[in-house]
Amino acid sequence: MDFTVSADPPHVVEFRKEVAAWMAEQFQGREHLRWSASWSTREDEEEYKFRRGLAEKLGAKGWLFPLFPKKYGGAELTIDHQVVLETELFKYGLNLSHVFYTLARIVAPVLIRWGTEEQKAEFLPPITRAEICVWQVLTEPHGGSDIANCQTKAIRDGDHYVVNGQKVMVGHHLPPDYLWTLVCTNPQGKRHENLAWIHIPAKLPGITIQHMNMMMGIKNAVFFDNVRVPAKYLIGGENNGWKVASTHMELEHGGDGRIAADPLVERVVEYCRNTHIDGKPLMEDDRTRDLIADMMIELNTLRRFNQLIYWRRFNKKPHPYGGPQQRYYQRMLRLRNGERLQAIMGADALEQNLSVHEVVDFEYAVRTGPGQLHGGGTLDTDRLIFARRLGLGRPTTEKAPETD
Amino acid sequence: MDLSLTETQEEFKKVAEDFVKAEVPAHQMTQWYKNKQTFRPELVKKAAEIGWLGMMLPEEYGGAGVSTMDCAVVFEALGHGPVPGPLFTSGVLSAQMIFEACTEAQRKALLPKICDGSAIVVPAITDKAAYWGPEAVESRLEKIPGGYLLSGAKRFVFDAEAATSFLCAARSEEGKVVFVLVDAKAPGVKITLHVGFFVSVAEVRFDKVALTGDSLLGTSGASWSTLEAALDKALPILSAYQVGATQEVFDITCEYTRSRVVFGQPIGRFQRVQDHCVDISINLDMARWATYEAIWRIDSGMDARAGVHEAKATASDGYYHGTNYAHMVWAGPGTDYSHPMMAHSVLAHTLYQYLGTPGHHKRLMMDALYPRAN
């Protein structure tokens, strides 16, 4: 067994040097923009431009999807190259799984699995090169976790689908180029057999987007009012949307895996070394150390779960419940760590620190504990899928959908 | 990165799994635990024949010179039994301690006997059940002409009744922790099984037991840090054993959700029952991957101490909590001492305590990573 992610096989030794030098060049004089490919509503214009620019430069080299064919915007490299990219990016708080606001890590594999050759050729390169920003828009006002109960209708009319309906709690504070969504193509059809997946250009007439100010940041309501979408944007065929959704959700729900470690513990230790109570650093306090130990073990566990899923995914070793397990664990862990942070540092854990990136701010960690319990389906949905994949109370276990 | 087992490890695993099926069937095992007859000399003999005792030791001492991971794969499979007896205490912990602490002559005299099962050396470390640090070593070693007198009472000695000798921690006259070998049959040694919600544990009393001058491990009795070095290699094996046991609890519990029907459907269709299984699975996989990662660090020659403590903490927590969640699924039938769940439940509580609770090991993990200022 070998957990190493930095001991390179000979064919990537030079590649690591190349990537390291290239990344150093990109960040020269911009060290303060570490983490800036991550989601944040606090970012300014400089950070946004830098992030998009960096993503496009990575995309132009095929490095965002190193395993993909070149014709789809990839670089036709090996899994070892991909691990090099993941680990070198992580030195700057980034990794390939970071969405760079493009959602590419989910959208691209779904297109590979379900798109026609024409769709792959047309839609993939702008996504894999991070030239466009895609939002996933799935939740509906009355749907919630039950996304198969989709009320947004897309009715065929000649060469177009006419879309009417509403999605909520989606996207972020910056506008999308495309909306990646599930629609109902046959209102009279059977559940799960009446849906289609569609990639909608966001600038089409009839689309209105309104911000929603929410616990985890800016989200949006998207309204479709007789939006005429060319039929070529339908992915996976009419009434086949549930299968496409299954692939999408497997990737969204923890099945993608990643190689990265949350730096929360290092920051808590730094705080506890610098904060003195009665002349003694908090770091010498037994209760504090016990809380940090639990925080660390759970974050280590999450890192190992992510690495395991990543390894299994790219080595084609099926693991039916890895995704929902990771996702349920990850969200409960955030909640527990939010409480631990407050127990360690009191109200300091609730105050925003604008001098650090949002994703490494304690306040963000506390707020998104309860704030991210539901995104993409509730904890209960996670456990429901988990139970099916374990085959509890059933004669057979459910397989994970294909994700490559 | 490669998170799979090697071919050899898959073979080791298969042999141990077959052993468990043939020698430790659930109905038999349950009776052993129920009747507190967990020392099975025939199992020790067979384990020695297969080569599991002292398997990590170099071949010159009777071992097989295998890696920590190779050994862990075997103990994980044995945990499925759970196979009782001193395979870990004598074959891993004492073997490592003697290997770390002893002179070449002592190694040559002791280790081959541990490996062939003719000697069963059981660690007897603390005099207080409530703590596992050196502070809880209170037995006294008094120097007398030609040897020593050992006095004290060790509590919670795991596998005590299997011992041919004890590897005993004691205070020298200077107050230092030293280790001596004590014949289990020596006059003044008294073994009394503890009665309670644990298994295979006893108090071992040493009443002015006379020891010869060569009873010290090594030339000067070694030290607590020698034990720590031995534990660095041994604890992950115990963790792997607990992972295997938790996997067994998980497997039989998931199977039960398919076969047990109430209110007209298998209980596994009830979401609250599902939740308990999800919780077992998380406890199990937390422990499994913490253990494997620590072992990988050991076998790669990296500093593994924090990871070793993390592994013991998560494995003991995992077995304990996993078993508790399983009780929620099994309900009444799982609380019958004639049911395999009870063997696991009692053993999970025992191993939660043995060699230190999860809380103890979490503190040692923190001390390894962030040493205290004073």
Image: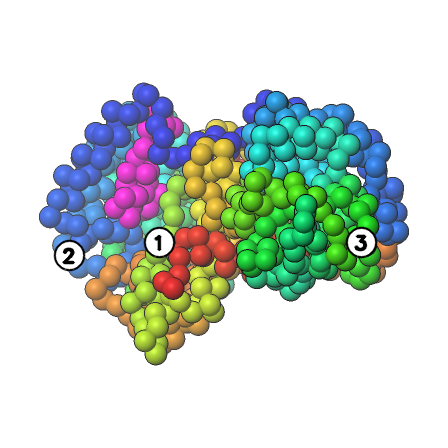
Asked if both marks, 1 and 3, belong to the same chain, the answer given is no
Residue tagged by mark 1? A263
CA–CA distance in space, label 2 to label 1: 26 Å
The quarter holding residue A381 reads bottom right
Badge 1: chain ID: A
Relative vertical location of residue A401 with respect to residue B355 in this rendering, above or below: above
CA–CA distance in space, label 1 to label 3: 56 Å
Relative vertical location of residue A216 with respect to residue A22 in this rendering, above or below: below
Residue A220 placed where, x, y %? 33, 61
Residue tagged by mark 3? B188
Residue type, label 1:
Pro
**Element class at badge 1:** loop
Q: Is residue A96 left or right of residue A404?
A: left
Badge 3: chain ID: B
Residue B334 placed where, x, y %? 81, 56
Residue A118 placed where, x, y %? 34, 28
Q: Residues within 10 Å of mark 1 (few under 14, many from 20)?
A: few
Mark whose residue sits in front, 2 or 1: 1
Residue type, label 2:
Glu
Residue tagged by mark 2? A45
Residue type, label 3:
Gly
Residue B313 placed where, x, y %? 57, 53
Q: Quadrant of the N terminus of chain B?
A: top left
Residues at badges 2 and 1 in contact (C-beta under 8 Å)? no
Is B176 or A59 nearer to us in this picture? B176
Highlighted magenta segment, given as a residue range = A76-99
Is A66 or B30 nearer to us in this picture? B30
Q: Residue at x 50, y 56 (%)?
A: B364
Residues at badges 2 and 3 in contact (C-beta under 8 Å)? no
Badge 2: chain ID: A
